Amino acid sequence: MLAYIVRRLLYAVPILIGVNLLTFALFFVVNTPDQMARVQLGDRYVSEVAIQEWKVQRGYDKPLLFNTAHEGPAAVTETIFFEKSLSLFALDFGKSDAGRNIAADIEQRMWPSLAVALPTFAIGIAVNIAFALFVVMFRASLFDTGAMILCVALMSISGVFYVIAGQFFFAKEWNLVPVSGYLSGVDAWRFLLLPVIIGVISGIGGGTRLYRTLFLEEANKDYVRTARAKGVSELTVLFRHILPNGMIPILTSVVVVIPSLFMGSLLVESFFGIPGLGSYTLEAIQAQDFAIVRSMVFLGSVLYIIGLLLTDISYTLVDPRVRLS
Amino acid sequence: MKIRESFIGIALMLSTAFWVTGCSDQAWNNPHPAEDAGKNILYSNFSGPPKHLDPVISYSADEGRFIDQIYDPPLQYHYLKRPFELEANTLTALPEIVYRNADEQPVSAEAEDLAYSDYYFDIKPGIYYQPHPALALNDDGEPYYAFETAAEASQYSALSDFAQTGTRELVAADYTYQIRRLADPTLLSPIRGLLAQYIQGMTEFAEPAKEARAAQQDGEWLDLRTIEFDGIEVIDRYRFRVRLKGKYPQFSYWLAFHFFAPVPPEADRFYSMPGMNDRNITLDWYPIGTGPYMMTKNDPNEAIVLERNPNYRDDFYPAEGEPADRAAGLLDDAGQALPFIDKVVYRLEKESIPLWSKFLQGYYDRSGVASDSFDQAISIDAEGIALSDDMRDRGIKLDIAVMPGTYYFGFNMLDEVVGDTGTVEERERKRLLRHAIAIAYDQEEYISIFYNGRGETGMSPIPPGIFGYQQGEEGVNTSVFDWVNGKPVRKSIDYAKELMARAGYPDGRNAETGEPLVLNFDTTVSSSGGASHDWLIKKMKQLGIQLNIRGSDYNRFKEKMKTGNAQLFQWGWLADYPDAENFLFLLYGPNGQVVTQGAGVNSSNYDNPRYNELFREMKLMENSPERMAIIREMIDITQHDMPWASTFHPHSYVLNNAWVYNSKPHGISKAVLKYMRIDPEQRSAMQESSNRPVLGPLLLVALLVIVLALPGYVGYRRRLNHRVNTVGRQR
């Protein structure tokens, strides 16, 4: 398995270079270093001299990809792309174009994101699986049809609606939780309750439908029929037989997102005032802060690759027939 | 069994959590910590993280609302008096100005051989800095914190982690040190280029400063006092002098900006220590000042907290104001020591809906009026604009003020179709075309539809409250309005069509070719722009003009403006200082966007030699009837040439909860927090009475879940029983 993991990690290197190159190209097609300087320095009284100084200080005075002023390797290394990209592979994110240490910012903002995302993720899976199993138990009945209609309805409603309605009823009309905000430490739970509930409810529709399909497939297999024939109770059939065997496809969709959880959710964090990473990249794009954009895209890619690797490894844990080689 | 136990466990946990919250006096939906209840804390918000808090770099209102409470520039604006009036802040009096000729001999302000203006500053003794680790000293009188390696800084992640703090008296050298920082090109102060035109020696300071920076090692401090700067001089502990080249009356206004606030060299040394920058511990993040407040928390992703500076000097609430101020209760606190509020907590609120909800719940003390809550907050009837009944019942108060700003619909005067180009006849025809468009652009309707009536049509670039603004018939723009029954009435569309015909576009078609006139409106793409664009197209259609909306991202738009490729556009300006010069320079030729490669503020690229000449003359004058006459002539020129089709001056609406006192909008200064007062007891009583938890709906939800689950459970039991019975019968 170790060889497999090493090989997968080596595959990741060209992928990450490609992602970096693509991010770089897309960013600089839209923005030029001059424009970035103007955004950072403001609209008023900004002179050409100040713009040039800003570029020199942050290394944006060099050519983008190829430096004709140099020969040999320096023609490639003395460029914005090389200088801004190489350090990322050592997970050295450097400083934002506004002068802040990016790693320190990420470290600070990932915890509130995790505080919302982890419980939403864990409770969401538990609720979706439980609800899906419950529906499977009454498959092909009126209850099943009703539940599926409800799921489609839940899926059809915009996420913003859940948030606004939740805030209106739970926080504004019934005064049960704060409308928004965040306090670190034990007080945080008061602020997390509503976003987590909303996150779970808004995910029930899609999650339940997916898991129901997976469980139904298992429910029709011979070993389930045999278990029932042996007189095993329905709850035991569902939780001891169908659930573990239905977990393999579930893992595919679940494990891959675990590492990305700390990247946060833009919608939930914006509306609930959670000081997480959800809006970090978007704010950076708006501020034309390339240093943050490239760091966050790189980090997202790394986490996705790790997620895929973990998914593969988890197969071997839940299904002894799977071997990684 | 395990599943059932888990559910019971979760239910117990939630009940306990609610019970614990319920046991405290605090309302369940209170977003503030329970221990802060009833304290003298003002709660406010911000929508995005401030970019810069360093007083030489920061230049936005969103940043000024924080640092202007901390930094103490030499001058400040009187809080209550209008028109805006400068007064001494940390000085004993307004700076003494001595004009000199090239031989250093004093001359009069009007002297033709005037070469320099010397500003003499005299600081009040006994002003002390906030407690700060940069000023902490050890027993030997040396800095307590003096790191030699980055590793020494690794244990600190915020300024509050430094246990030792110190203070010292404010001295003249701190002000001159800040002027050196302004002149340092590596710090990228936005106004360095502007001030370098006036402050003697500022341009010359740049090169050696840059060289010294280049020679620095990482983590090494550059003491800017070691670099020669002949325009500034420390006379003694409390006095210093700044020399300007020539005369620049607007310099006094800049002295009320945080750009000129003192920064102790010790702070510069402290933040330059190895490893500090890597920990994001910088002056750009943690200000140090002598003002009424100090920043004790800077987490712009969550909250920014200002607390009363324990070393703040004697400072008192003003005893004079406008005539209406006494009746409004704004002089009730006259002579009281400032500041009134102990702590200010700004919380991040990106969305307007939660912000508005929390304001109504009493968890924010003040709020603006967003468009989606406008109808709930404001009622408009025949008597004008007022608070809605709901707001009045809550005791909420509304502050309305005209902002010292101007938004305008402009023409690019370099454009071949609408600009001031070509032969004399062509230029006249283009002027008539601009004139016709100005009439068709119904500014009053635009304000009413897209700003909920929050603004007033402008007759010139100068907004109300600024010297040069003229009210009534005297100030009316006669090119666009007629004065009828004591009020301005926009000229008719028929008249505008007549102008179109004279311009060579009868019915919107080129009289020679018959081609329809197509104009381009350049704008940035935004989701809210659609309706206003449709409105604009409709207005131009009245003249037969086909308007093409050219939307682009902000970068492209700026590029078009910089290169002179825009045609029609909207732009705006909020004053730096309350002087006509700060508005009339928006049309001063040498400030053109194209000639300055994007650095200028004249977006229309308007360039009228007479106007430019008058501007240069007006700029150097004190406010006087002569100056007013020049301003009037300048306005007449612009109303004739019409580089802008229309202007309007926006209104600011601020809502204050019933327990907020001394609120008076000040369009220029942000350093107004020290005057505000709140009644925390009144606030607590309101919060308690109007935020009691409503548990009925929760019980209803629980009941609903049971009702829905019950058929499932019954069905499940029936299924189990059904199978057993069937097997029994088969046997």
Image: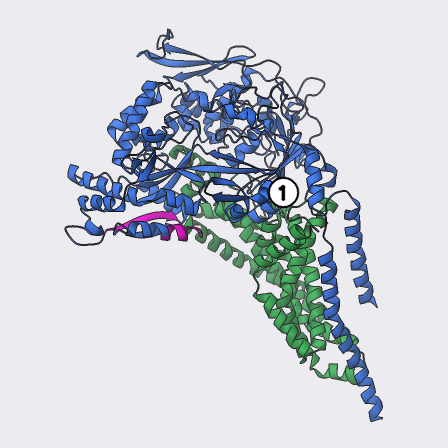
Chain colours: A green, B blue
Q: Is residue B68 left or right of residue B166?
A: left
- Which residue shows up at 47% across the image and 45% down it? A288
| Residue matched to label 1 | B302
- Which residue shows up at 38% across the image and 26% down it? B580
Question: To which quarter of the image does residue A219 belong?
Answer: bottom right
- Magenta run includes residue B191: no
Tell me if residue A104 can be seen.
Answer: no
Vertical side of A173 occupied by B290: above or below: above
Vertical side of B259 occupied by A120: above or below: below
What amino acid type should be assigned to the residue bearing mark 1? Answer: Glu
Q: Secondary structure at mark 1?
A: loop
The C terminus of chain B lies in quadrant: bottom right
Which residue reaches farthest top?
B105
Question: To which quarter of the image does residue A201 belong?
Answer: bottom right
Which residue reaches farthest bottom?
B731
Q: Is residue B666 left or right of residue B659?
A: left
The location of residue B531, given as percent across then percent down, is 40, 52
Question: To which quarter of the image does residue B412 belong?
Answer: top left
- Which residue shows up at 40% across the image and 14% down it? B117
Vertical side of A319 occupied by B558: above or below: above
Question: B181 or B69, which is in the foreground?
Answer: B69
The location of residue A92, given as percent across then percent down, is 58, 45
Q: Chain of mark 1?
A: B
Vertical side of B9 occupied by B687: above or below: above
Q: Is residue B682 left or right of residue B642?
A: right
- Magenta run includes residue B529: yes
- Which residue shows up at 35% across the image and 10% down it? B102
The location of residue B180, given as percent across then percent down, is 49, 22
Highlighted magenta segment, given as a residue range: B517-534
The N terminus of chain B lies in quadrant: bottom right
